[in-house]
Amino acid sequence: MPERPIRLFGDPVLKTVSAPVEQVDDRVRGLVADLIDSVRLPGRAGVAASQIGVNLRAFSYNVDGEVGYILNPELEVSGDTELIDEGCLSVPGLWHKTPRHPFARVRGIDLDGNEIELSGTGLMAQALQHETDHLDGLLYLDRLEKDERRLAMKEVRESDWF
């Protein structure tokens, strides 16, 4: 399957809480294939289903050469938040200091219904938090501190894609 176009800031699907995957069928298998194809492009650490217009709890990741996916992820974090430079495919060209926990873990299932767990620090922790936020209807802009958010929204309004 080909990679799918990324939905941009302002698209209502990005602010919608995603529904759980209730049944793994051909539609869900196709979604996972599209997510994997979409995340393999250079510069992508993760793609959430909502970013390609599908309101289901699924995302793919591509961190340190490891590519995969998870369905119905439930996030756990630990450690005090740190400000980390972060961007988003749905808000192209913008990078802002975003509060993120240094460790994250998600538990969910694979296409066979088996329980899986992903965890990590650094970019993996950031990606797990970022993609789970998408599934909860949040963009990284929603996590920015007040002054940083004001600056980011100004940049969005002045961008050539908005």
Image: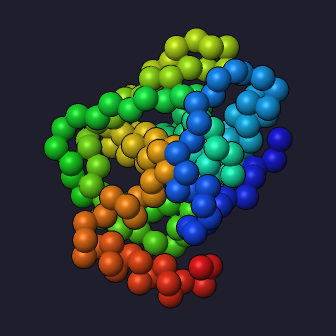
Camera-nearest residue between 55 and 87: 55
Q: What's the residue at 55%, 51% (across, down)?
A: 16
Left or right: 54 as drawn, with respect to 80: right
**Residue 108 in view here:** yes
Q: Name the quadrant containing residue 103.
A: top left
Q: What's the residue at 35%, 68% (across, down)?
A: 96
Residue 46 in the image, given as x and y percentages of width and height: 54, 46
Name of the residue lying farthest toward the bottom: 158
Residue 32 in the image, given as x and y percentages of width and height: 70, 34
Q: Name the quadrant containing residue 120.
A: top left
Q: Is residue 150 above or below residue 25?
A: below
Residue 91 in the image, given as x and y percentages of width and height: 53, 67
Q: What's the residue at 49%, 30% (across, down)?
A: 73
Q: Is residue 115 above or below residue 153?
A: above
Looking at the figure, which quarter contains the N terminus? Answer: top right
Q: Is residue 45 above or below residue 43?
A: above
